[in-house]
Amino acid sequence: MRIAIYGAGSLGTIVGAYLSKGNQNVELIDVNQEHINTLNSSGATIVGTVNENVPVKAITPEEMSGSYDLVLLLTKQIFNKQVLENIKPYLSKNGVLLSLQNGVPEEAVSAIIGKDKVIGGSVEFGATWVKPGVSELTSAEPAFKANAFQIGELDGTITERVQKIKEVLDLVGGTKISTNLVGTKWSKLMINIAMSGTSAVFGCTYGDVLNNETALETAIRLADETIKVGHSIGVKFVKMGGLEIEKFNLNKDRSNLNEAAEYAKVAFQPQALLKASMLQDLEKGKKCEIDYINGVVSSKGKEVGISTPFNDLLVELVHKAEQEKSVPDFDTNIVYFNELIDKGI
């Protein structure tokens, strides 16, 4: 099986390293020429909760040739049209694209690649870009090895091809096959909305969110809005990485808010060092995926008539940072959410 990792950033570098270590025929593909050069000359280096250095083969998109049996898509959704058109000619006749992007991009991806060639999935571990050739694994190693991916066919069936892909990804970390892909993707979306969203808007790590009462309540309220919007369109949320998503579904009087907050402190502690990729983009002065993460709940909420004030405010503040090419300040932005909480919304 010839494999391509398209988008060899923080996550892709780690995935590529472990697949290469497992003797897979894999190429890491990225537009960052310095990163590609370092990967080829010095190997993929993983730091953080593990320490690994693995020789890999890396190329730029312009250097692609032949055909791939499996493409792991790890680029950001904001580039999808160009990226997918570039990948399409290089998929083999029976080739599969596994979308591991944040959000719920499968419908849009299928429209370009073809529904029969797309499998969906979610990444359940965290990573931070350090420098060319180096990625930091921020999830605790036991959690990473137990729960690295969930993947599944779009129609929920368990096929031979999805089982083969699971075997490949098990070389990286624990991989589960989902028969409820929509639920899987929305469950991962909820985690990203609650924790990546707060990391981005407050300019901090997950641990900083967990250690601040207002930031943590903001994360819970973001999760609650996501669950309520998801329920309204028929989403059945699933357990992810041992996390019970429905624990964040608040009662009408929010009497279970403290219980949800205490659960979050324990559940997300293994990712305390993680800094959201959206924040990493803001630090580089780049646009991030906020419209494909928290923005999904804001737009869907409007469609179904469900109020989403916490997601709306978060999207507004992150867009402001994008426009100003600034990094959100914790002390400044926490005030806005504290005001929202004080209003009893």
Image (cartoon, helix red, strand yellow):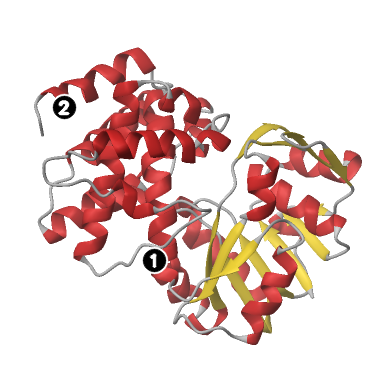
Amino acid type assigned to the residue bearing label 2 in the image: Leu
Q: Position of residue 285 (x, y in %)?
A: 49, 28
Camera-side residue of 324 and 122: 122
Please name the amino acid that badge 1 sits on.
Gly
Q: Position of residue 34 (x, y in %)?
A: 76, 37
Q: Nearest the camera: 242 or 332? A: 242
Q: Which mark is residue 121?
A: none
Residue 152 spot, x, y in % from top left? 53, 73
Q: Secondary structure at mark 1?
A: helix
Image-based side of 182 in relation to 214, left or right: right
Relative depth, front residue between 163 and 242:
242
265 relative to 79, above or below: above
Q: Nearer the viewer, residue 277 or 33?
A: 277
Name the residue rendered at 33%, 49% in the picture. Answer: 247
Of the numbered discs 1 and 2, the one sitting upstream in the chain is 1
Instruction: Judge whether residue 103 can be spotted in this image.
Output: no
Query: Which image quarter holds the C terminus?
Result: top left
| Quadrant in the picture for residue 19 | bottom right
CA–CA distance between discs 1 and 2?
29 Å
**In what quadrant of the picture does the N terminus appear?**
bottom right
Instruction: Check disc 2: other Cα within 10 Å, few if <14, some if 14-19, many if 20+.
Output: some
Mark 1 residue crowding within 10 angstroms, few (<14) / some (14–19) / many (20+): some
To which residue does mark 1 refer? Answer: 183
Eyeballing the image, is 303 above or below 249?
below
Disc 2, SS: helix
- Residue underneath mark 2: 340
Percent across and percent down for residue 110 are 46, 75
Q: Quadrant of residue 28?
A: bottom right
Answer whether labels 1 and 2 touch (C-beta < 8 Å): no
Considering only vertical position in the picture, is 264 above or below 23? above
| Point 27% across, 54% down: residue | 227
Total tally of numbered discs in the picture:
2
